[in-house]
Amino acid sequence: MSRIKAYIPFSKGGFLTAIAYRTHILGFLVGELLFSFIMYYLWKTVFANTGGTLLGFTFSDMVVFIFLSNATRFLIHSEATYTVAEEIVEGSISMRLIKPVRLDLSLMFTDLGGTVLTFVLIFIPMLIGIEIYRYFEFGVWMISPVRILLFLFSASFSFLVNFYFDLCFGFMAFFLKNLWGFSILKQSMVNFLSGSMIPLDFLPKIFADPIKLMPFASISYTPVMIFMGKYSGTALISAVLLQVFWVIMLYVISSLIYTIAKRYLSVQGG
């Protein structure tokens, strides 16, 4: 606990930074909501010609999937890549490295500070909106505290998978110096392979099965499927254990990359 207390100021700093740039968060939220509604009308057109179901999904399922996937992406968002790359450019990474704290944990707790604000201002209202939609759609409240708790439990691992994957990518800035273009490519790849844009079950089985074993599915698809009741019993346990596996693997990989990368540190602005 004493070690954890050393990182609490980083969370406070992340929270205060998120508040300071709340206009940025609001603009990002509006943009994602517009994207969600575009996807809503796109899938509405698709389901109008399917007879009501598509590969086990109803249109109501698809609406929940669209908005919950976007809310989950907000919730587990990480700035690790951007922070590491920016500090290398500015030269301020040297100040972080000489502090008696672990680099990965300082970045993680900074992200957690912003996540608290995201949870309160974005995720909870989105969740309430989803439940209201389902009430008017089915005439009964379908909210399940157990599923919400299971979702949050899985989403905590999603955050760690996403953070350490982001950190692995961010450490490439020690070699490449500038990751702006690669970051856009990385985010586009993650958005697609994580199943946050299109359910992975909609892909051909020859592609869907391998992708589900990759870390990307553990980032978004797993908690969303748990919330929707698509995973239960053995499938749920297997999915969560796969998340745990990728947390451990990506932690080890990020540690190895960092051990090598810090020997080649040079900054542009230091």
Image (cartoon, rainbow, N blue to C red):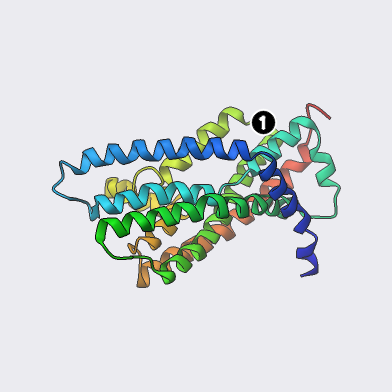
- Report if residue 215 is visible in the image: no
The answer to which of 256 and 120 lies nearer the viewer is: 120
The residue drawn where x is 42% and y is 36% is 34
The residue drawn where x is 41% and y is 53% is 129
Side of 132 relative to 113 (left or right): left
The number of callouts visible is 1
Q: Give the amino acid at mark 1.
A: Leu
The answer to which of 65 and 145 lies nearer the viewer is: 145
Query: Looking at the picture, does residue 265 appear above or below residue 209?
Result: above
**10 Å crowding of disc 1: few (<14), some (14-19), many (20+):** few
Q: Where is residue 209 in the image (x, y as percent from the top left)?
A: 34, 53
Residue 236: quadrant of the picture: bottom left
Q: In the picture, which quadrant includes the C terminus?
A: top right
The residue drawn where x is 54% and y is 60% is 157
The answer to which of 224 and 188 lies nearer the viewer is: 224
Circle 1: element type: helix
Query: Looking at the picture, does residue 66 appear above or below residue 151?
Result: above
Query: Looking at the picture, does residue 186 appear above or below residue 129?
Result: above
Judging by the rendered image, the residue that carries numbered circle 1 is 176
The residue drawn where x is 48% and y is 68% is 149
Query: Looking at the picture, does residue 192 appear above or below residue 244?
Result: above
Q: Where is residue 105 in the image (x, y as percent from the top left)?
A: 71, 55
Q: In the picture, which quadrant includes the N terminus?
A: bottom right
Q: Position of residue 216 (x, y in %)?
A: 47, 49
- Report if residue 249 is visible in the image: yes
Q: Position of residue 159 (x, y in %)?
A: 56, 55
Residue found at the very far left of the displayed protein? 51
